[in-house]
Image (cartoon, rainbow, N blue to C red):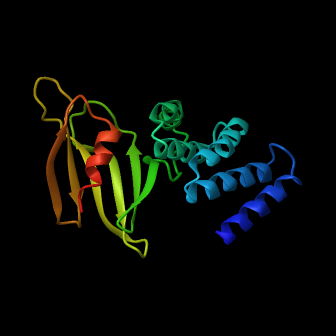
Amino acid sequence: MEKFDFAVNIAQEALKHVEKGSDEDLMYNYNLGLFESLQGNFEKSIPYFEYVIQMNPKDYIAQSKLIQSYYHLKEYEKAEPLKKNIYKAYADSLLVGTEQEDMFCVEQFNIAGKKILAFERYEDGKSSKIYNKHCFYILKPDGTLDFRVQSEYSPFAENGEMLYYLCATYSVTSRYNSGIEYTNDYSYQKVSKDAKKID
C-alpha cells in the first residue's frame, strides 16, 4: 500500500508541472487511473480515464480500461458507447497492428488465486462458420496460460436462432464442451457467470 501511495503522489505531483493536454499530462492521468483500478478503486479510476479519452478520443486502450472499470462496478450500460467506439475503430481499420486488432479486454479479476483476463472479439452476429465471441484466459501464478474458456458461436442452430456454446481449451489436443448453451438471450454477464465455474 505504501508503494501505491508513493506512486500516486509522484504522478499527482508531476501533473502540476506539465502542460494540460500534453503527452505527459495524458500519460500521468492514464497511470493514475491504472494505479487506482489495480488497487480495486474502480470509481476513483473513472475520472482519470474519462479525462484521457476526452483529450484523445482515439486512445482505445484508455477506453478499454474504462470499460473494465464499469464492468467491475456492474455498470454495463455505461460501457456500451465505449464499446461502440472500439468496434467502429475496428471497422475503420484503425486497430490493425495494435494489441486490439482482434479483440479487446473487458474485465480482469481473480478467482482462487488465479488471474483471469476476459476479452471480447469483434466478430458478431450470424455466420456460416464457428467463431469465439468472449474468451477468458486463466493464468497460472507465474503469469503463463493455464487454460482458456470461450463462448463459441455455432452456425447449426435451428429456427433462425443465435446459438453459442461455452467451451474450454486446455491444450492443442484437449477441448471440453460444458453443455451450457445460449440462444438469443446471449450476454457477457451470463457467459462470465458460467465461465467462472469451469476449472
**Which residue is drawn at the image coordinates 38% and 44% (left, top)?**
121
Q: Toward the viewer: 130 or 136?
A: 136
Q: Residue at x 69, y 43 (%)?
A: 52
Along the line of sight, the residue nearer the viewer: 122 or 45? 45
Q: Residue at x 45, y 50 (%)?
A: 107
Determine whether 157 is above or below 139 in the image.
above
**198 relative to 69 in the view: left or right:** left
Residue ranking furthest to the front? 1
Q: Is residue 108 above or below residue 131?
A: below
**Position above or below: 29 against 89:** below
Q: Horizontal and vertical percent for residue 86?
A: 51, 37
Screen quadrant of the C terminus: bottom left
Residue 175 is situated, as x and y percent measured from the top left of the image, at 17, 60
Which quadrant holds the N terminus? Answer: bottom right
Picture quadrant where residue 181 is located: top left
Residue 99 shown left or right of residue 164 in the figure: right
Q: Residue at x 64, y 47 (%)?
A: 44
In the picture, measured across the screen, residue 21 lies left or right of residue 59, that is right
Residue 103 image position (x, y, % from top left): 43, 47
Please give left or right for residue 165 compared with residue 186 in the image: left
